[in-house]
């Protein structure tokens, strides 16, 4: 409000000043006389001021016209001028509008429209580093891989777009299944941009698929260096790669190097079960049982596993069942409430013929966490304590339909593996296997396990065997309980024997 009032007052003051000035000029006597080529002009003071102002405006117009004429001449000669800049701005505006329309068409899935807009943008902008990428992506969307390849190769000639071109070609080779070429392109792309996380992951996955464990460890180190991976995750995955490298070295017959690599893998991740088993067996071969026991105990504390128990048994394979119970106390005193520990103690006592201690160790596990292994152990205990055949067969029948218990399951696709591998056989995920319970199969008959003992209790032994499938009969024929043989501590359940049966 005050500013508006000030502007009004200023305008009135200026007009008043001009009016007073004009009045003062008109009251002055004399003037200006101009004589040119016999022509004489007499101007009063006010007229002289007006003519002077007109002359200033005329001179300014002449200068502007001269500059315009000079700009036209330069424009015709191809030099950059205000005129050329005007047309350039017009072209850029049209080009960027076409580029924006092309990007929107690409996002909408209109590949043909996107390619047309990209061509129009290139016509106006002449910026191939912008328009070629749009053209390549539109060509890929439309299925014209040949056109996309040509455009990506063009991008390789410019340092600014070289990485984009290499990465685009890498993705094409992956889609085509040419993993060899894709891996070389991924290595080149990572050399251009070491911090690019997607390229790091792509190269790591390809190296793992090709069993290039040494190269994968370098890539993993690069991920850690450039902040693409937490330190604890890097340590775990580096251990997985070191273990895989050790297995590859062992396959080549280099046992000494393999032992060292396995020990290194176990040092990096003591809770990695396969690494602990391999390192322990390396120590056993080097006649270092105390080191082997220490490695296995540390892994058992992290996660009890049948393979750890089997390797622990290999430290002293010729010991008696009672001596084995005493030695295994170093292992079983840890994680005593874990199902794996309880079943291991039960196995050891069954092997020693102490069925009371075996039943105490097993506890209510067959009811609270029923599994094939727990129910089979309970059947062995019942047979050892003199139970009738009907009771034993009923337990074995329940075991047929009971869950198998923890297995190596991929966390991504839930695929079950017979043994641990660094890469999932189904989805190709790296370090995704974990020792856990597999998901229940769909369509399982509810209550089936509970009904089988009742059915089998009414059948004769021969009828029971006919009811079992061929595969189940084969499993049963391997079990001394089903063969009506007396349980022998050397035969029934040493940890290594049971684990090998589980794997079969």
Image: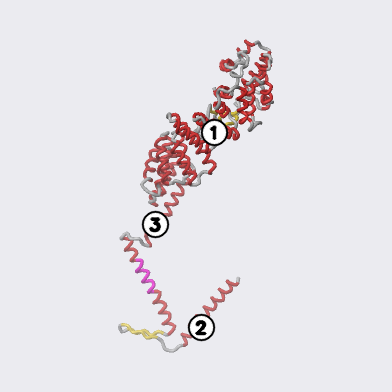
Q: Main secondary structure of the magenta part?
A: helix
Q: Quadrant of the N terminus?
A: bottom right
Real-space Cα separation, disc 3 to disc 1, in angstroms = 77 Å
Mark sitting earlier along the chain (3/2): 2
Q: Nearer the viewer, residue 24 or 499?
A: 499
Residue 61 place in picture, x, y as percent:
38, 71
Residue 248 appears in the figure: no
Magenta segment: 58-68
Residue 347 place in picture, x, y as percent:
62, 23
Residue to which mark 2 is pinned? 20
Mark sitting earlier along the chain (3/1): 3
Q: Quadrant of the C terminus?
A: top right
Instruction: Check the image and tell me how it is coloured.
Output: secondary structure
Is 265 placed above or below 468 here?
below
Q: Residue at x 62, y 16 (%)?
A: 487
Q: Which mark is residue 88?
A: 3
Q: Nearer the viewer, residue 341 or 14?
A: 341
Is 33 placed above or below 346 here?
below
Residue to which mark 1 is pinned? 291
Secondary structure under tag 2 reads helix
Secondary structure under tag 1 reads helix
Residue 144 place in picture, x, y as percent:
40, 38
Q: Residue at x 42, y 85 (%)?
A: 44
């Amino acid at each position: 409000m005050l500013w508006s009032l000030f502007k009004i007052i200023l305008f009135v003051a200026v007009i008043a000043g001009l009016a007073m000035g004009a009045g003062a000029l008109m009251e002055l006597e004399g003037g200006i006389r101009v004589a040119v080529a016999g022509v004489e002009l007499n101007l009063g003071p006010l007229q002289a001021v007006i003519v002077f102002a007109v002359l200033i405006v005329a001179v300014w117009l002449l200068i502007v016209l001269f500059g315009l004429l000079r700009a036209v001449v330069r424009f015709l000669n191809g030099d950059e001028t205000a005129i050329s800049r005007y047309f350039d701005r017009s072209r850029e505006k049209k080009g960027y509008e076409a580029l924006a329309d092309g990007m929107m068409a690409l996002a909408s899935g209109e590949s043909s429209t996107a390619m047309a807009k990209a061509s129009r943008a290139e016509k106006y902008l002449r910026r191939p580093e912008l328009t070629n990428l749009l053209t390549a992506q539109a060509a890929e969307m439309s299925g014209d891989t040949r056109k996309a390849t040509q455009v990506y190769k063009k991008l390789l000639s410019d340092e600014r777009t070289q990485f984009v071109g290499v990465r685009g070609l890498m993705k094409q080779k992956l889609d085509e299944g040419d993993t060899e070429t894709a891996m070389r392109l991924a290595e080149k792309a990572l050399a251009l941009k070491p911090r690019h996380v997607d390229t790091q992951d792509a190269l790591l996955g390809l190296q793992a698929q090709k069993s290039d464990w040494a190269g994968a460890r370098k890539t993993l180190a690069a991920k850690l260096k450039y902040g693409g991976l937490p330190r604890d995750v890097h340590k775990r995955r580096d251990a997985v790669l070191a273990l895989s490298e050790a297995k590859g070295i062992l396959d080549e017959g280099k046992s000494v190097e393999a032992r060292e690599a396995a020990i290194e893998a176990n040092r990096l991740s003591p809770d990695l079960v396969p690494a602990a088993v391999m390192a322990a067996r390396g120590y056993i071969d080097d006649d270092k049982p105390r080191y082997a026991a220490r490695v296995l105990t540390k892994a058992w504390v992290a996660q009890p596993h049948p393979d750890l128990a089997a390797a622990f048994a290999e430290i002293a394979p010729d010991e008696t069942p009672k001596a084995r119970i005493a030695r295994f106390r170093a292992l079983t005193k840890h994680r005593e409430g874990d199902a794996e520990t309880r079943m291991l103690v039960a196995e050891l006592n069954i092997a020693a013929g102490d069925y009371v201690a075996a039943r105490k160790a097993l506890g209510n596990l067959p009811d609270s966490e029923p599994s094939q292994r727990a129910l089979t152990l309970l059947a062995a205990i019942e047979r050892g304590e003199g139970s009738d055949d009907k009771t034993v067969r009923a337990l074995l029948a329940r075991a047929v339909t009971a869950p198998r218990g923890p297995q190596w399951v991929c966390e991504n696709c839930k695929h079950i593996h017979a043994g641990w591998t660094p890469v999932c056989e189904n989805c190709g995920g790296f370090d995704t296997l974990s020792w856990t319970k597999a998901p229940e199969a769909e369509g399982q008959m509810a209550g089936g396990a509970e009904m089988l003992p009742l059915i089998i209790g009414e059948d004769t032994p021969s009828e029971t065997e006919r009811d079992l499938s061929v595969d189940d009969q084969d499993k049963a024929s391997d079990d001394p309980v089903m063969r009506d043989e007396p349980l022998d501590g050397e035969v029934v359940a040493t940890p290594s024997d049971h684990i090998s049966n589980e794997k079969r």
